Every structure is written in C-alpha cells, then in structure tokens.
C-alpha cells in the first residue's frame, strides 16, 4: 500500500474520521486542536505534558498536513536535533511522541460551526456533524485546510464517492476494477503502481493520464511507473480528461468511460469502473476567517506571550498566525505551541498554579509519558 498519507498510528491514537452521523452528545474536552500538521501534533504533546486533554481535527483523511501532502519524501534539515528527515518521517516521529496522551483524531472534516457559550466554553461542530464542547481552541491550520483540486467537468460531481474519488481510504474497494487515474505527482503515481502490482488490491486494468509526459514525483517512483508501462502492467496516456460517459439512467451514479483529448487534439475513450483524480491540493483558509479574530493578510494576529488571539480561549500557532518578526518555520511553530499550551492550561485550570517541569527530572512527567526515569532516585 502506498505510504503517502498512510502513516501508521500507534494503538493509543484513536481515529474517528469515518463517522458521518452526528454525535449523540457533544464530546467534552479541555482543548480542540484544529490542524494535524507537525505543529498541531506537537501542540497535542505540549498540552498533554500539562494534563490538558485534547481532540484533533483535520480536513485531510490522515495526519501530517503540508509535510505529507507537499514533501513526504523530500529531506528537511532544520528540525532541532534531527540532522535530516523527510516529511513522512517527521510525522511518524511526532505521532510516536504524542502517543502517550491518547488524543482522538477526527479526520476528513472541517470546522463548520463555532459558538461561544455563556460558560465561556466553545461549541464546535464539523462538516460531518461531530460536535464538541471545549474550554480552549488551538488553531494550527497552517496556510489553511488542504482540499483536493477538482476535475471541472459539468455534471461530473454527481459521481463523487461512487465512481469518482479524490482520495483512497479503502484500496480493497477498487480491487479487480478498471481504474483510470488522473495526475502526475507522487500520489497519482503511487496509487497507479500500487493497483497495478499489489496482489490483494490489484486492479483489472490501470490507466494513468497526465497532461504531460514529465512527472513531478520522486525519481525512484517515476522509474517504477515507467518500468510498469514498459511491461504493459500499466497504461500511460498523455492528454486531458475533457468528458465522460455514464449509464443512460439519469439516476445512476456510475461512470463508464473517460473521454481523453490527446496532444494532437484527438479524442479517445477509455472504459472505466473507477476514476481517481489526484491533481494536487490547494489551501483554503475556510471558516477561521469568520470567527471574529483580528487578522492581517489572511493570518491571525497573536500576542507573543502565549500566542492567544483577540478571542479569549482561542490560540493560533504555526503558519496560520502572524506577529512582529514572524518566521514561517516548523521550529518556530514548535516554540509557539509550547507557550500556547501554558496559556491554555491557565484557562483549563484557573485555580492551579502552572509549574514548569522538565522531562529529564520530573517524576510526574515520567508517569505521563510512561517512561522510567534515568535516575531511579528521582522517583
């Protein structure tokens, strides 16, 4: 199975991205983290060190955010203490680090409603109907929620999630089918090679369509796909999908073919059962812009003491925020998350003095992290 967007989670991380029904009762939590990119994941860890429980929401169907979507296999050299890692490796490390705190993920959904309650807590509802009552909100949405770029053909949208898909959640659903994949980046090539070769999920046929014969993907992946084309395990076409065919029944939600215009302007028909479209993703700021927060150039203004916004109880960390001297670096976001956690803890525990403790020496933190102290006498 392709590893893009499929970072394995430890058993103590909970996923609830597939629930479509409204929760019977709102989920109550100390903090709701919006955004599961590196800064959002580290935010959960920092909150956990201060006994602040959290849930995490992301529009993507998997954790990792921009790291997974834009540079999963490209090297990153400026993570403290880590000379080199990929976006995928960084995401996996952060997931392992936050695992002791058992945060629940709510993936593939956007925040659609945010209301301040009389008790100063927030009511939040997502696009899938999941409801929360939270004491604090930590916005770690990066440059916005990543949403797939759509294939714009009139009438095509009615086939979405039946025979047209912009992501793959259950690859076995596509086994033994005629698949057409549109795109030229890592995700398109990974799924094309997967369905052309994987025994369990192997498709009846796979056709990869891209507007050029040059791919924007990892070199090793390009070599693999070209090898599959050479042995006719995978068909590659240069062109663009300009139309489609479907069953004559207007109530049907089943595509039957893609109409492809090649570089010579000739129209070809490719039979299919499933159309997978991977044209990349675009960030959209979304409902954050309607929350009444002070903003500057589509970024949330924060203080630099605790990275709180102009709305008490709402904090913003990472690329979503701005302040004098702001630098859009992952390591800057990590620093912001640490200070924001202390700001949130002061609201969650108003009668408690929030003490700074060190993971090297604090028995309490060792207990939370489930580790043995290096010095047994520290118990």
Image: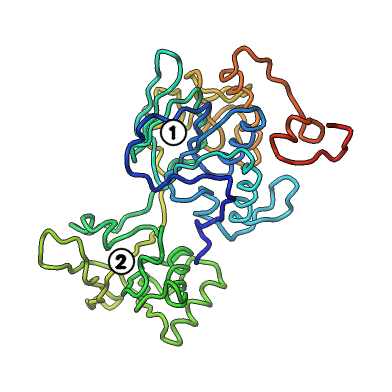
In the figure, 253 relative to 40: above or below? below
Label 2 CA crowd tier, 10 Å (few <14, some 14–19, many 20+): many
Q: Earlier in the sequence, mark 2 or mark 1?
A: 2
In the figure, 204 relative to 50: above or below? below
Quickly name the residue at label 2: 275
Quickly name the residue at label 1: 298
- Location of residue 337 in the rendering, given as x and y in whole percent from the top left corner: 61, 33
Query: Which mark, by number, is residue 203?
Result: none
Q: Nearer the viewer, mark 2 or mark 1?
A: 2
Could you say which quadrant of the image residue 113 lies in? top left
Give yes or no for contact between labels 2 and 1 (Cβ–Cβ under 8 Å): no
> In percent of the image, x 26 and y 76: which residue is there?
270
Distance from Cα at disc 2 to Cα at disc 1: 34 Å
> In percent of the image, x 66 and y 40: which residue is there?
331
Q: Residue furthest left?
A: 249
> In percent of the image, x 64 and y 41: which residue is there?
100
- Kindly state the secondary structure of the residue where label 1 is placed: loop
Could you say which quadrant of the image residue 275 lies in? bottom left
- Image quarter where the C terminus lies is top right
* 95 displayed left or right of 263: right
In the figure, 61 relative to 128: above or below? below
- Location of residue 77 in the rendering, given as x and y in whole percent from the top left corner: 69, 52
- Kindly state the secondary structure of the residue where label 2 is placed: strand
């Amino acid at each position: 199975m392709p590893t893009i967007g499929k970072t394995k989670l430890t058993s103590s991380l909970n996923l609830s991205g597939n629930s479509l029904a409204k929760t019977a009762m709102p989920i109550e939590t100390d903090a709701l983290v919006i955004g599961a990119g590196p800064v959002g994941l580290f935010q959960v860890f920092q909150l956990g060190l201060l006994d602040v429980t959290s849930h995490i929401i992301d529009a993507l169907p998997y954790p990792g955010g921009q790291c997974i979507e834009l540079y999963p296999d490209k090297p990153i050299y400026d993570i403290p203490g880590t000379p080199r890692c990929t976006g995928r490796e960084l995401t996996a490390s952060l997931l392992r680090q936050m695992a002791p705190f058992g945060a629940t993920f709510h993936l593939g959904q956007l925040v659609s409603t945010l209301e301040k309650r009389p008790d100063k807590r927030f009511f939040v509802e997502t696009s899938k109907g999941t409801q929360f009552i939270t004491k604090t909100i930590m916005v770690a949405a990066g440059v916005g929620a990543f949403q797939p770029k759509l294939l714009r053909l009139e009438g095509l949208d009615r086939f979405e999630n039946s025979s047209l898909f912009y992501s793959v959640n259950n690859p076995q659903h596509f086994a033994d089918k005629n698949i057409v994949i549109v795109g030229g980046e890592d995700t398109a090539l990974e799924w094309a090679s997967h369905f052309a070769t994987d025994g369990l999920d192997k498709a009846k046929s796979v056709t990869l369509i891209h507007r050029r014969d040059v791919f924007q993907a990892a070199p090793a992946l390009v070599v693999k796909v070209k090898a599959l084309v050479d042995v006719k395990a995978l068909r590659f076409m240069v062109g663009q999908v300009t139309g489609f065919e479907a069953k004559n029944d207007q109530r049907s939600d089943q595509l039957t073919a893609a109409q492809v215009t090649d570089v010579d302007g000739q129209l070809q028909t490719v039979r299919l059962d499933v159309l997978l479209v991977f044209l990349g993703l675009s960030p959209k700021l979304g409902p954050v812009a309607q929350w009444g927060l002070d903003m500057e150039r589509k970024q949330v203004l924060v203080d630099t003491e605790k990275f709180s916004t102009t709305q008490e109880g709402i904090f913003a960390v990472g690329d979503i925020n701005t302040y004098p001297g702001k630098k859009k670096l992952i390591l800057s976001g990590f620093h912001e998350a640490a200070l924001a956690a202390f700001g949130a803890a002061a609201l969650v525990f108003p009668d408690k003095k929030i003490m700074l403790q060190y993971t090297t020496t604090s028995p309490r933190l060792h207990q939370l992290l489930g580790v043995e102290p290096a010095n047994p006498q520290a118990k």
